[in-house]
C-alpha cells in the first residue's frame, strides 16, 4: 500500500485538488497541470507522483471506494456527508487499500482487454512515434493519425529536431490524399500522442495549423510535461471550439516521452540499465567471457534498444574485455554517442579508431556530473550496457530509471561475474523493482522493470 507517514503536505494537496473538482468537474488531467502550475506549490518529484496517483485513483475508483466506506461504517451514504469530509475519507480509504487491491501495470503475457476505437487509433499513432526514437533529440518522439468516417486518411511522425512536427507531416499527407474529403475536416479527428505545441520554436505552433484546417476534434495521449507549455495547447484549441479529449493510452504515451520529460524536469537524462544475464544473475564466466549468454533474438532486441537511445554507456573494463562497437546494427539513421567511463583504454579500441570515433566520449569522475553533461548535449536517453561495477554504481547512486533484463535459461555458478558488482545490500535495504512487462525473445526472457523509488536502497 502507499506509505502514509511523512506525507502530510502531499496528502493535503490531494484533498485540496479533489475538493476543488467536486465543484468544477472538468478534465482532471488538465486540471492537474493547472494545479501544479500554482507558484505557491513547490512539490518534490516524489510528492507530485504521490498526489497524482491518489487523485487519479480516487477519481477512477470512486464508486468502489464509496462501497468500501459504506461497508465498514454501518452503511453511511457518503454523498450525504460534507464535501470536505467525504473527500478526506475517500483519500484515506484509497491510501489504506491492501497490496492485493492495487492496480499494477499488466505484464505482456496477460490477455489484453479489448481496445475501443480511440485507443485503437492512438495505438497506431504511438507505433508511428516510435519510428522517431533516437532521432528527435532534444524533442520527444510524437506520432499523429487523422481519422474521418472511421477510417485513417493520413499519418505522420516527427522525424528529427528542426523538421516538421508529427501533426504537420500528418496533415501534409492528408492534403496529398485525393481520395479523402480533405476540403472539410470539421468531422475529422486528429489523434496525437502528445499535446500539440502552442509556441513558436524552430517550427510554427501546431495549434495554429489545427485551427487553420478546422479539424473538429483532437484526441491527445498525454499532456506536455514542460511546465512552461503544459496544458496551453489544449486550452487554445478548446477556446476556439475544438473538442479535445485527453488521456487516451496515457500510460503508454507518457512512457514513450519519459526521457524527454526527465531531461526537461530534472536536467538529467533517462537511464535504462541493460543486463544480459544467466538465470543465476551472472554476466560473464570466471574468465570474463560473455559471448554469448543470450541468443540471437535477444541480441536483435538489444539493437532496437540502442536505436531508441541517444547515448550508449559502458565502463572502460567492458571496452578492454570485449572491444564492442556499441553502434546499433542496422543503424537506420541513428548515431548515438558512445560514452566510456574510466581510463586506460587500448589505443586500438574500436570506439577510438572506427568511422564513428568522433562520437566517442571518454569520461571519469562523478557519474551524476557525467550524465548531467550529456543532458547539456541534448542527450535524453542513455542505455547502459555494463559492466557489473558500473551497473552497481548507477543503482547505488539512484540514477537508474528503468531496467532491461535479458535472462538466459542457463547457469554459470558462484565464480561467475555478478551483474551488479561484488558489493551488495543488507536484506532490509535491498533495491526493489516493479516488473512492467515480460516477453519471450527466442529461448530467453526480456523483462522490463522500474525501480521502487521509495525503497531504502537509494532509488
Image: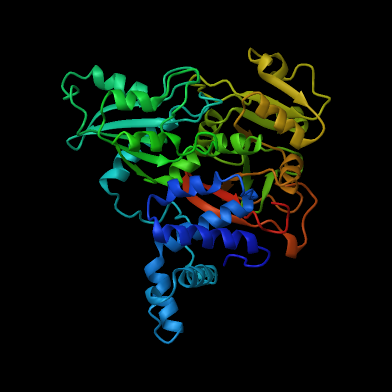
Res. 172 image quadrant:
top left
**Residue 104 seen in render:** no
Frontmost residue, 305 versus 244: 244
**Residue 238 seen in render:** yes
Q: Position of residue 421 (x, y in %)?
A: 76, 46
Frontmost residue, 445 versus 212: 212
Vertically, is 222 above or below 412?
Answer: above
How many numbered circles does the render carry?
0
Q: Position of residue 111 (x, y in %)?
A: 36, 56
Q: Position of residue 68 (x, y in %)?
A: 43, 77
Vertically, is 31 above or below 160?
Answer: below
Residue shown at 49% from the left, 65% from the top: 102
Judged left or right of residue 440, residue 425 is right
Frontmost residue, 50 versus 393: 50
Vertically, is 84 above or below 159?
Answer: below
Frontmost residue, 226 versus 413: 226
Residue shown at 54% from the left, 72% from the top: 96
Residue shown at 69% from the left, 20% from the top: 360
Q: Position of residue 390 (x, y in %)?
A: 74, 39
Say how the picture is coloured. rainbow
| Quarter of the N terminus within the rendering | bottom right
Res. 393 image quadrant:
top right
Furthest-top residue in this view: 355
Residue shown at 55% from the left, 25% from the top: 137
Amino acid at each position: 500500500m502507499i506509505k502514509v507517514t511523512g506525507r502530510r503536505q502531499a496528502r493535503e494537496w490531494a484533498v485540496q485538488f479533489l475538493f476543488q473538482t467536486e465543484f468544477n468537474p472538468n478534465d482532471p488531467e488538465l486540471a492537474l497541470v493547472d494545479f501544479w502550475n500554482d507558484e505557491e506549490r513547490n512539490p518534490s518529484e516524489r510528492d507530485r507522483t504521490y498526489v497524482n496517483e491518489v487523485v487519479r485513483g480516487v477519481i477512477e475508483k470512486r464508486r468502489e471506494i464509496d462501497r468500501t466506506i459504506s461497508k465498514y461504517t454501518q452503511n453511511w451514504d457518503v454523498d450525504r456527508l460534507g464535501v470536505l469530509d467525504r473527500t478526506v475519507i475517500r483519500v484515506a480509504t484509497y491510501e489504506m487499500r491492501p497490496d492485493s487491491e492495487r492496480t499494477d501495470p499488466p505484464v505482456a503475457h496477460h490477455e489484453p482487454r479489448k481496445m475501443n476505437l480511440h485507443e485503437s487509433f492512438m495505438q497506431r499513432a504511438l507505433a508511428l512515434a516510435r519510428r522517431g526514437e533516437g532521432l528527435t533529440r532534444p524533442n520527444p518522439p510524437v506520432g499523429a493519425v487523422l481519422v474521418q468516417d472511421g477510417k485513417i486518411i493520413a499519418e505522420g511522425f516527427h522525424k528529427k529536431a528542426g523538421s516538421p512536427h508529427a501533426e504537420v507531416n500528418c496533415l501534409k499527407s492528408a492534403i496529398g490524399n485525393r481520395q479523402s474529403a480533405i476540403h472539410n475536416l470539421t468531422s475529422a479527428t486528429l489523434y496525437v500522442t502528445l499535446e500539440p505545441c502552442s509556441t513558436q520554436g524552430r517550427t510554427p505552433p501546431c495549434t495554429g495549423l489545427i485551427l487553420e484546417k478546422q479539424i473538429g476534434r483532437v484526441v491527445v495521449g498525454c499532456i506536455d510535461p514542460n511546465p512552461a507549455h503544459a496544458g496551453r495547447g489544449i486550452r487554445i484549441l478548446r477556446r476556439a471550439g475544438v473538442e479535445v479529449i485527453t488521456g487516451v493510452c496515457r500510460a503508454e504515451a507518457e512512457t514513450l516521452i519519459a526521457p524527454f520529460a526527465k531531461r526537461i524536469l530534472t536536467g538529467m537524462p533517462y537511464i535504462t540499465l541493460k543486463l544480459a544475464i544467466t538465470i543465476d544473475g551472472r554476466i560473464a564466466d570466471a574468465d570474463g567471457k560473455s559471448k554469448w549468454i543470450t541468443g540471437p533474438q535477444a541480441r536483435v532486441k538489444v539493437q532496437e534498444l540502442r536505436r531508441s537511445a541517444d547515448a550508449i554507456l559502458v565502463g572502460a573494463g567492458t571496452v578492454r574485455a570485449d572491444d564492442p562497437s556499441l553502434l546499433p546494427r542496422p543503424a537506420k539513421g541513428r548515431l548515438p554517442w558512445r560514452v566510456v567511463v574510466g581510463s586506460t583504454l587500448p589505443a586500438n579500441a574500436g570506439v577510438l579508431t572506427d568511422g564513428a570515433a568522433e562520437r566517442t566520449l571518454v569520461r571519469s569522475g562523478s557519474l551524476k556530473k557525467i550524465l548531467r553533461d550529456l543532458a547539456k548535449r541534448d542527450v535524453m536517453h542513455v542505455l547502459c550496457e555494463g559492466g557489473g561495477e558500473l551497473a552497481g554504481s548507477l543503482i547505488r547512486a539512484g540514477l537508474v530509471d528503468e531496467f532491461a533484463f535479458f535472462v538466459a535459461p542457463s547457469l554459470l555458478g558462484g565464480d561467475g561475474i555478478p551483474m551488479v558488482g561484488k558489493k551488495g545490500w543488507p536484506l532490509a535495504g535491498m533495491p526493489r523493482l516493479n516488473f512492467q512487462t515480460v516477453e519471450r525473445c527466442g529461448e530467453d526472457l526480456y523483462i522490463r522493470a522500474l525501480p521502487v523509488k521509495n525503497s531504502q536502497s537509494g532509488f
